[in-house]
Amino acid sequence: FQYLRRFDSECNLDSFHYQACSVEGSPAECLQHFLLHCGIMDPSWSELRNFAWFLNIQLKDCEASVFCDPEFVQDTLQGF
C-alpha cells in the first residue's frame, strides 16, 4: 500500500523503502488502491489477497536487488 500510494502521488520510488512499523492511511484507502491497481473488474477477496501477496513479494525482491539500488545503478537505469 505504501508503494501504491506514492506511485499514485507520482513520488519518486527509487529511494523509497517499505517501513513495517509505519502506519499510513486508512483501511478504506488501502482497499481503494488495491481495487484500482489489481487489474480485475470486481475482484473477489481472494483475488485481492493474491494481488497484495504477489505485489509484496515482488517489491521485497526489488528492494533486495542491487540492480534496483539507486546507489549502485546511479543514472544508468534511472526509474528502472
Image (tube, helix red, strand yellow):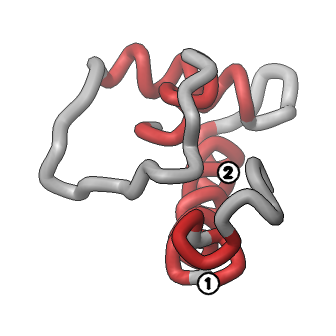
- Label whose residue precedes the other's in the sequence (1 or 2): 2
- Where disc 2 sits, the SS reads helix
| Amino acid found under the numbered disc labelled 2 | Phe
- Where disc 1 sits, the SS reads helix
Name the residue at 81% across, 62% down: 77
Residue 44 spot, x, y in % from top left: 69, 36
Residue 38 spot, x, y in % from top left: 75, 36
Q: Which mark is residue 1?
A: none
- Asked where in the image residue 11 lies, by quadrant, the reply is top right
Label 1 close to label 2 by CB (< 8 Å): no
Name the residue at 42% across, 16% down: 29
**For this view, does 71 lie left or right of residue 68?**
left
Name the residue at 25% across, 29% down: 24
Q: Which mark is residue 66?
A: 1
**For this view, does 5 lie left or right of residue 79?**
left
Q: Nearer the viewer, residue 53 or 58?
A: 58
Residue 46 spot, x, y in % from top left: 63, 49
User: Closer to the camera: disc 1 or disc 2?
Assistant: 1
Say which residue label 2 marks.
51
**For this view, does 51 lie left or right of residue 69?**
right
Residue 2 spot, x, y in % from top left: 42, 38
Residue 24 in the image: above or below residue 69: above
**For this view, does 66 lie left or right of residue 21?**
right
| Amino acid found under the numbered disc labelled 1 | Val
Name the residue at 56% across, 43% down: 13
Residue 29 in the image: above or below residue 46: above
Q: Quadrant of the C terminus?
A: bottom right
- Residue neighbourhood size for the residue with mark 2, other residues' Cα within 10 Å, grouped as few (<14), some (14–19), many (≥20): some
Residue 39 in the image: above or below residue 54: above
Residue extending furthest front?
Answer: 75
Q: Nearer the viewer, residue 50 or 1?
A: 1
- Residue neighbourhood size for the residue with mark 1, other residues' Cα within 10 Å, grouped as few (<14), some (14–19), many (≥20): few
